[in-house]
């Protein structure tokens, strides 16, 4: 073929002009059209997976063995709830020995007819009556505490009067029989004790009143300025309101806002803060 010598000449000139490498590339035979295709090879592009289940406009999610990660969020992770510790029971303010030594009198725990404290004195406070009378008496420690309580009341502009302290077994017997003759025995026993069952025989109880109720021992005293002050301050001087409101089923007696019982400051404050009667404290 006459074209071949001409082609060789052109390549030779190109090699001189452009350099040998370009001419060598030019002279390489074109084998792309002649090489047989490997088995299974095809000129068609590889088929793609069908897209019928993928909504248009949304990218497909690759299927892998691991769960897809959730998008990040600005919300803080919830912390596990921590159970609050149980409230501790308040410790008792006195020893077991001191607790056992408390003179405890009620309808279930009577005193002997001959019981009489040997340290009875008359406190230096104002009374609702004149003259000497055993019911002015209290045991010495209780009498001194009552003096401090009355002094503080006076300083705070509260005028109290002591009405009835110590009573013997015989005196309590006469009082109860008189009340029972007027009200009937059952009703009388809601406010008046049988002989031997009265706290007044201990020498640790004092009934207190004020001129605002004509020195009477009535529930209305608890609503007076004097009665309210007494309820709020008695414990600071070692006394409790022995028969509080709404505790008749426990104490056995109706509400008596005038009836003070001496226990000492620690125990009186504990019972008042916890809302406990002497029965609830000693019979638990």
Image (cartoon, helix red, strand yellow):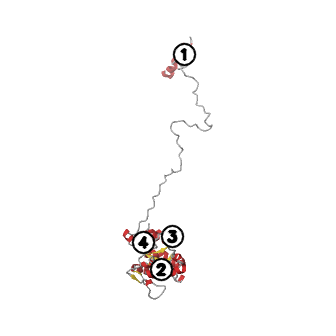
Mark 2 vs 3: CB contact within 8 A: no
Residue 156 in view, yes or no: no
Please name the residue that numbered disc 4 is placed on: 267
Q: Is residue 78 left or right of residue 115?
A: right
Could you tell which of marks 1 and 2 lies nearer the N-terminus? 1
The quadrant holding residue 169 is bottom left
Mark 1 vs 2: CB contact within 8 A: no
Please name the residue that numbered disc 2 is placed on: 207
> Mark 2 and mark 4: span between their CA atoms?
20 Å
Please name the residue that numbered disc 1 is placed on: 7
Please name the residue that numbered disc 3 is placed on: 249
In this orientation, which residue lies closer to the viewer: 272 or 218?
A: 218
What residue appears at the point 51 percent right and 70 percent down from the top-left corner? 249
Question: How far across and down, in percent of the image, does residue 56 sit?
Answer: 63, 37
> Mark 3 and mark 4: span between their CA atoms?
22 Å
Q: Quadrant of the C terminus?
A: bottom left
């Amino acid at each position: 073929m006459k074209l071949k010598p001409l082609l060789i000449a052109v390549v030779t000139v190109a090699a001189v002009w452009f350099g040998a490498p370009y001419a060598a590339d030019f002279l390489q035979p074109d084998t792309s059209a002649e090489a047989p295709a490997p088995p299974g090879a095809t000129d068609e592009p590889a088929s793609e997976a069908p897209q019928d289940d993928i909504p248009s406009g949304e990218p497909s999610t690759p299927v892998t063995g691991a769960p897809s990660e959730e998008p990040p969020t600005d919300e803080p992770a919830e912390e596990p709830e921590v159970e609050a510790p149980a409230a501790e029971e308040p410790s008792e303010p006195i020893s077991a020995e001191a607790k056992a030594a408390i003179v405890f009198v009620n309808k279930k725990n009577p005193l002997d007819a001959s019981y009489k404290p040997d340290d009875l004195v008359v406190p230096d406070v104002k009374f609702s009556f004149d003259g000497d009378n055993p019911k002015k008496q209290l045991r010495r420690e209780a009498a001194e505490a009552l003096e401090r309580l009355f002094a503080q009341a006076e300083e705070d502009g509260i005028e109290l009067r002591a009405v009835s302290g110590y009573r013997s077994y015989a005196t309590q017997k006469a009082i109860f029989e008189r009340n029972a003759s007027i009200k009937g025995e059952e009703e009388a026993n809601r406010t008046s004790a049988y002989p031997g069952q009265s706290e007044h025989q201990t020498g640790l109880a004092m009934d207190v009143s004020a001129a605002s109720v004509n020195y009477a021992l009535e529930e209305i005293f608890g609503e007076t300025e004097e009665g309210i002050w007494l309820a709020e301050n008695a414990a600071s001087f070692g006394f409790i309101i022995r028969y509080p409101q709404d505790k008749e089923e426990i104490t056995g007696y109706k509400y008596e806002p005038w009836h003070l019982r001496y226990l000492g400051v620690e125990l009186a404050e504990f019972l008042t803060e916890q809302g406990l009667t002497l029965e609830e404290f000693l019979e638990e």
